[in-house]
Amino acid sequence: MKIVRIIARLNVGGPARHVVWLTKALNNQEFQTSLLTGSVPEGEEDMSYFADENGVAPFFIEEMSRELSPKDIISLWKVYRQICREKPEIIHTHTAKAGFVGRTAGFFYRWLNWKNVKIVHTFHGHVFHSYYGNLKTKLFLFIEKNLARFVTDKIVVITKQQFEEIHHQFGVGKAEQFQIIPLGIDLEKFAEADEKRRILRDEIKSDDDDVLVGFVGRLTEIKNVSLLLKVAGIYEKNKNAELPKLKFVIIGDGNTRKSLEKEAEEFGLKDKILFLGNRNDTDIFYAGLDIIALTSLNEGTPLSLIEAMANGKSVISTAVGGVTDLLGAVETEESGFKVCERGIRIDENSAENFYKGLLHLAKNSGLREKYAERGRNFTDLRYSKERLIKDITELYLNLRPS
């Protein structure tokens, strides 16, 4: 069975790992899979090295990238031409831009060539709020509704909450088109997290009693990292001998890094917040952190929280996208935050509320130990790379064209 997989760009993040793992695994006696991808724009780190490490050689289409552009006509033609060469039985697109270009090309391939090709799209997140202005958002939603109605055979979402948002709230697709397939990660990489704890902490000269609070991800507007800077500012303003010793670490890079560093300096936090840039040693830096903080305005299922749980780290996050599914049921409600099964959730997005939740977590080592055990058990059960490959394999076999 021939599969053509399409993603707009291999930039730093979960979707790039996702498509590389699937492309590698689904080249066997049962499947032949090729990967089409576009260019990574300036200001974002290219993760093509990850494809190289896994023996995956993507077909690059230079004109295809994240933003809408007149070049999309060229990328559409090139994707269509490559699909005609490959003659796939299934076209599987990932992320919004590739979903538009790839599914449109698939539509033309299906009807111009009388091919019974099945078309699948995975929403790793969505752009239906917080990314763009009202007019542009309405245009994207109109496009997605029509692609779902006229082109797409199966829509994959990665959490139940994402299904509720995309289908029920925004009216995309029919319920029977959807299938929930959670992300998968390489859990074996994090097997010895406790033994690696000191490596990062020694690097940044951190004491054993410091509580390291880390953000991990792209530094872009949607991640709202400025909120974490404000939280750090509140902590510094109120710091005294009775409070835990918090240190803040930002791991990642992106177009907002310079403005965030300037903001930190304006808050008087230049030496209080460490910007470590992009790092490939996930098993090292997660092991050294104590709490992973996510401040996003919009998410699919954040890879940083899954990886944090797999490493036995506590998490605190704004209530966006699949975060509510990750953190589980609410156990107690406090002033400004909720204590959930597997982490702290901030429903009202304010620095004061986030600070309250973070301080509650930092003060309570027993709660952090409980979250460590629950997080590891949860990710072992639901988020292995092997489970992801098995679920996608079953999806394809069930879609096999007659």
Image (cartoon, rainbow, N blue to C red):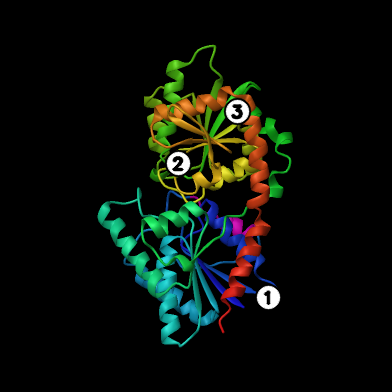
Q: Does the magenta run of residues contain 374?
A: no
Q: Nearer the viewer, residue 338 or 114?
A: 338
Q: Is residue 66 visible?
A: no
Mark closer to the chain start, 1 or 3: 1
Q: Amino acid at mark 1?
A: Glu
Mark closer to the chain start, 2 or 3: 3
Q: Quadrant of residue 368?
A: top right
Label 1, label 3: how far apart the Cα atoms are: 48 Å
Give me the disc on residue 204: 3
- Residue 9 appears at what percent x and percent y? 48, 59
The quadrant of the rendering that contains the N terminus is bottom right
Q: Amino acid at mark 3?
A: Ile
Label 2, label 3: how far apart the Cα atoms are: 30 Å
Label 2, label 1: how far apart the Cα atoms are: 40 Å
Secondary element under disc 3, as helix, strand or loop, is loop
Q: Amino acid at mark 2?
A: Ala
Q: Nearer the viewer, mark 2 or mark 3?
A: 2
Q: Which residues are magenta?
A: 45-53
Q: Residue at x 59, y 72 (%)?
A: 396
Q: Which residue is labeled 2 in the image? A: 319
Mark 2 nearby-residue class (10 Å; few <14, some 14–19, many ≥20) = many
- Residue 154 appears at what percent x and percent y? 49, 69
Residue at the extreme bottom: 114
Horizontal arrangement in the rendering, residue 4 relative to residue 231 (left or right): right
Q: Which residue is labeled 1 in the image? A: 30
Q: Residue at x 66, y 58 (%)?
A: 387
Q: Is residue 276 above or below residue 123?
A: above
Mark 1 nearby-residue class (10 Å; few <14, some 14–19, many ≥20) = few
Mark 3 nearby-residue class (10 Å; few <14, some 14–19, many ≥20) = few
Q: Nearer the viewer, residue 185 or 331?
A: 331
Q: Is residue 289 above or below residue 208?
A: below
